Image: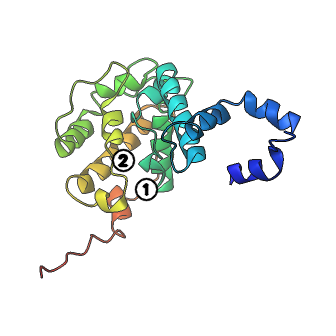
Amino acid sequence: MARSVELTFLWDNKQPNKQWKTITTNNRIHQRYNKLRNSNAPPNNPVHQAITEKRNEEYTSRRNKFKSISCMRINRIIDPILYQPAFSRDRHRLIKWRMHWLPSYPLKDCRCGHKEARRENFATCPLLQSLLIDLIDKFGAIPELPPNMHQLDHILNLLPKSEVGLIMGKWKTVWPALIRVLREINFLSHPDDIFDEDEPAPEETLEFLAPPSSTSPD
């Protein structure tokens, strides 16, 4: 569509629109688009390809600059935590963990006594170990990770992209265990707050997902 708009009234080869020409000349996406369009083997959709390449380039650049993004997946995708089944509070915690806002700032002392507990503390916090060990037992062995990456980041980076994948194999137990760990981190990192409201079991969000129907062999 963008190309159609350009051809219809913004870019007349006989008399180009000066303002549009100035904008597109300095626009990196448009420069990339022209390069793709004029290449020996142009893609079927150079506009889409140019935008995708620019987004991937920007994502890679941000991964090198920001600690929170460096802990995410290498490939740029919509993070499954945004749509996989979870209660609203749990999704809020998932997002906060991804954004490095859990534990929240200003940092508070952990209930275990660790002063101004950061994310790294919750890899070794004695009050979290039972839940964390249970999660890793359900997930499986975790390789050596970069210094800034927590075990939870690694597990979240391998989260299935579909709801069906979440109720198959190990994930039907890993997902609830992961939610419980984040609930506990939220509890431990707010020592002055009162948590007197019971939350529903994380497994309840999976009850409405029907397993894939098996087809009988011919």
Q: CA distance from mark 2 to mark 1?
A: 9 Å
Q: Residue at x 51, y 24 (%)?
A: 61
Q: Are marks 2 and 1 in contact (CB under 8 Å)?
A: yes
> Does dot 1 land on a helix, a strand or a loop?
loop
Q: Residue at x 57, y 44 (%)?
A: 46
218 relative to 29, above or below: below
> Does dot 2 land on a helix, a strand or a loop?
helix
Q: Nearer the viewer, residue 201 or 141?
A: 141
Query: What percent of the width, then of the height, locates residue 87?
Result: 46, 56
* Residue 194 in sight from this viewpoint: no
Q: Nearer the viewer, residue 143 or 3?
A: 3
Q: Which residue is mark 1?
A: 86
Dot 2 amino acid type: Ile
Quarter of the image with the N terminus is bottom right
- The dot on residue 48 is none
Color theme of the render: rainbow
- The dot on residue 179 is 2
- The quadrant where residue 149 appears: top left
Q: Residue at x 69, y 49 (%)?
A: 3
Q: Which numbered disc flags the more N-terminal residue, 2 or 1? A: 1
Q: Residue at x 20, y 75 (%)?
A: 214
- The quadrant where residue 181 appears: top left
Dot 1 amino acid type: Ala
